[in-house]
Amino acid sequence: MGRAPCCDKANVKRGPWSPEEDAKLKSYIEEHGTGGNWIALPHKIGLKRCGKSCRLRWLNYLRPNIKHGSFSEEEDHIICTLYLSIGSRWSIIAAQLPGRTDNDIKNYWNTRLKKKLMGKQRKDQQSLKSRGGQIKPEMKREVLEDLKAPSLCMNMMNLYQSYWPTELPMMLTNPNQHQDQLHVKTQDPTFEQYQQFDTIISNQPEELTAAYHPQLPNTPYFVNNNGDGGINLFQEFNNYPFGMINEFGCNTTTQSSEQFNGLVGGLNNLINGSNCTSSSAESTTSWGDPLACPPPITYEDCRRGLLQNCPPPEQPASRFQ
DNA sequence: AACGCATCCAACCGCGGCAAA
DNA sequence: GTTTGCCGCGGTTGGATGCGT
């Protein structure tokens, strides 16, 4: 049995709101509040609208302090950084941008920001092709500058803390390559590692391989020890040249503090080798911010942060012991 | 001026989570 | 423990507008 509809769709008005409807809704809520029941609200006001429609109209348009108009560079930066960290959790992203709604941010991302970044990716890929698959340091620099690299590092650390409060992650890299990238793959010095990884992954329990997303090739995932899912850290950058992202980490299934340090260290190295020195902040990112070095992140840092911020959670029994 | 295509964004839809019955 | 119904979220749609030819 399906869920009962929230309203009689035949008897509710749909489509754009008139100024009269807006005024009715706004004045009622300002005077009486929502009453905690959106479904009942339109009946009280005498609006022939679905309660959900009223809620959406209020939250996205009528409520006070809504900011309309273009997004600032700073807002762009926050959206991109958070999207990179947590994906399309628009409500969470919106919570970091006072006056912006999740719908606004979602629309802005889908229509502009994503294209901005994807356009950059295409440019980089064309550039790679013309160089016969070699990845130049300046390309790495461009990518990281685009991503506001220091924030990327910090977000990875936060991610790590959020998802795996007491355990080190294993980092996996999908060995299934796009056919059109095969030529790059065979030139990649880590190709052998992928072949080894193929063997390793084929010997893993089903739960582990299930956490490994074949539809998103070339992307590193953290998979926790319980095998209940992984996070694609670079989901918007799947098309970056093979090997570039891979340099950020290692791709074995061995857990070790060296492994995590290797991942973060790789990032730090890339950043530190990209116009970023500890004594100078002369260069700027594409956001126009000074490019400053992030604090070095180590496994020990994460553990320390964890001990301060997170009480040890109850651990379910590992399926991979 | 007219047409077609691209872009923007308000609004809708369906689902999962959650609390109350 | 199960059912019911609301809330909030993310994905998608479609009308309005802009722009190029």
Image: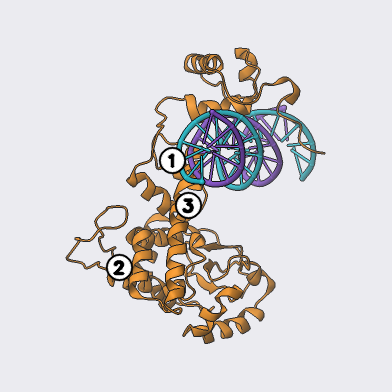
Chain colours: A orange, B purple, C cyan
Q: Quadrant of residue A245?
A: bottom left
Q: Residue furthest left?
A: A279
Q: Position of residue A94 (x, y in %)?
A: 45, 41
**Amino acid type shown at disc 1:** Ala
Q: Is residue A298 visible?
A: no
**Amino acid type shown at disc 3:** Lys
Circle 2 is placed at which residue position? A296
Q: On the rendered image, what quadrant is the C terminus of chain A found in?
A: bottom right
Q: On the rendered image, what quadrant is the N terminus of chain A found in?
A: top right
Q: Position of residue A251 (x, y in %)?
A: 51, 77
Secondary element under disc 1, as helix, strand or loop, is helix
Q: Quadrant of residue A132?
A: bottom left
**Amino acid type shown at disc 2:** Pro
Image-based side of A206 in relation to A103, left or right = right
What crowding class fits label 2: few (fewer than 14 Cα within 10 Å), some (14-19), or many (20 or more)? some
Q: Chain of mark 1?
A: A
Q: Of residues A212 and A35, which is closer to you in this image?
A: A212
Circle 3 is placed at which residue position? A114
Secondary element under disc 2, as helix, strand or loop, is loop
Circle 1 is placed at which residue position? A95
Residue at 44 percent of width and 76 percent of height: A259
Residue at 37 percent of width and 57 percent of height: A308
Q: How many numbered markers are drawn?
A: 3
Marks 3/1 in contact by CB < 8 Å: the verdict is: no
Which one is closest to the eye, mark 3 or mark 1? 3
Residue at 24 percent of width and 56 percent of height: A290
Whichever of callouts 3 and 1 sits on the residue coming sooner in the sequence is 1
